[in-house]
Amino acid sequence: NAGVTQTPKFQVLKTGQSMTLQCAQDMNHNSMYWYRQDPGMGLRLIYYSASEGTTDKGEVPNGYNVSRLNKREFSLRLESAAPSQTSVYFCASILDRDNEKLFFGSGTQLSVL
Amino acid sequence: SQKIEQNSEALNIQEGKTATLTCNYTNYSPAYLQWYRQDPGRGPVFLLLIRENEKEKRKERLKVTFDTTLKQSLFHITASQPADSATYLCALGKGGYQKVTFGTGTKLQVIP
C-alpha cells in the first residue's frame, strides 16, 4: 500500500519553463490537496479537489493550475515558472470531509533559477 | 487575519524527559486541532486530532490539550527518545474541505 505518491522528487527549472507535478493516491480517498512549504511560512494550500471532477483555489493559487484526472490522480501545473515558486510541494488526501486526517506524499523539491 | 504561532526556536530536551510544545492561535475559531510530525525530506505524518469540545487526548506517550479560551494547545511527549526528534506541526481546522491552517512547526531534538 503506497499511500500518496508524488513525482518527481526533485526538479530544477529555468524561469519561464513549464512543468507538471504528479500525484496519485491508492487509498480510494475522495479529496486531494496541493500545498507548498517554505521556511518560516508553514504549509500553504494552493488548490484542492473536494471530489472527482471539482477543483477549487486555496490560499496561494496564482501561477498554478490543477487537474483532477480521476479519483486517484491530481496534478499541479506551473505554466511559466518564477523564482518565487521555488519551494517544496506536497500532495495530500483525505477520505472525505468527515475524516480530517491528511495523508501526505513525500514531496517535490522544486528550484526555479 | 488568522495566525498560528509555534515556537520557531528548536527545543532541546534530554532523553527520558517530557517534551512540551506549544501552539497558540489568534483570530480563529477552530472546530478541531491536529498535530503532525515531519522528518527531514518527508511529508508530515498525522499524530493526533482533538476537537473543540475536548480538553485532552492521549495516544501512547503523546498527550494533547486544547484550551479554546486561552486559544492554545499543548503537545506533550513523555519519556522522550532520540527517535522523537523531528519537527512537529500544529494545524487548525473548521471542518469541510479546505479550512485547515498549519503552523510553521517546532523542531524537537532529544539528546541521548
Image: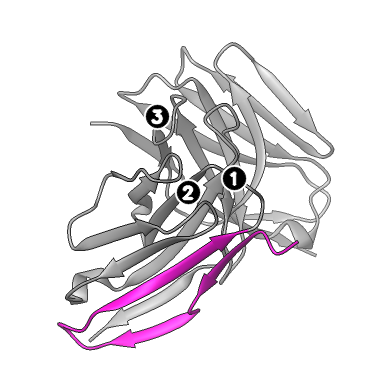
- In this rendered view, identify the residue nearer to me: A89 or B71: A89
Report in which chain the residue with disc 2 lies. Answer: A
- In this rendered view, identify the residue nearer to me: A8 or B14: A8
Please identify the quadrant where the N terminus of chain A is shown: bottom right
Disc 1: which residue = A29
Q: Secondary structure at mark 1?
A: loop
Main SS of the magenta part reads strand
Does B26 appear above or below A68? above
The boundaries of the magenta stretch are A1-25
Disc 3: which residue = B25
Front position among marks 3 and 2 = 2
Does B56 appear above or below A55? above
Callout 1: few (<14), some (14-19), or many (20+) C-alpha neighbours within 10 Å? some
Q: CA distance from mark 2 to mark 1?
A: 8 Å
In the image: residue B69, left or right of residue A12? right
Disc 2: which residue = A32
User: At label 2, which amino acid type do we have?
Assistant: Met
**Residue B99 falls in which quadrant of the image?**
top left
Q: CA distance from mark 3 to mark 1?
A: 29 Å
Which residue is drawn at the image coordinates 34% and 87% (left, top)? A12
Report in which chain the residue with disc 1 lies. Answer: A
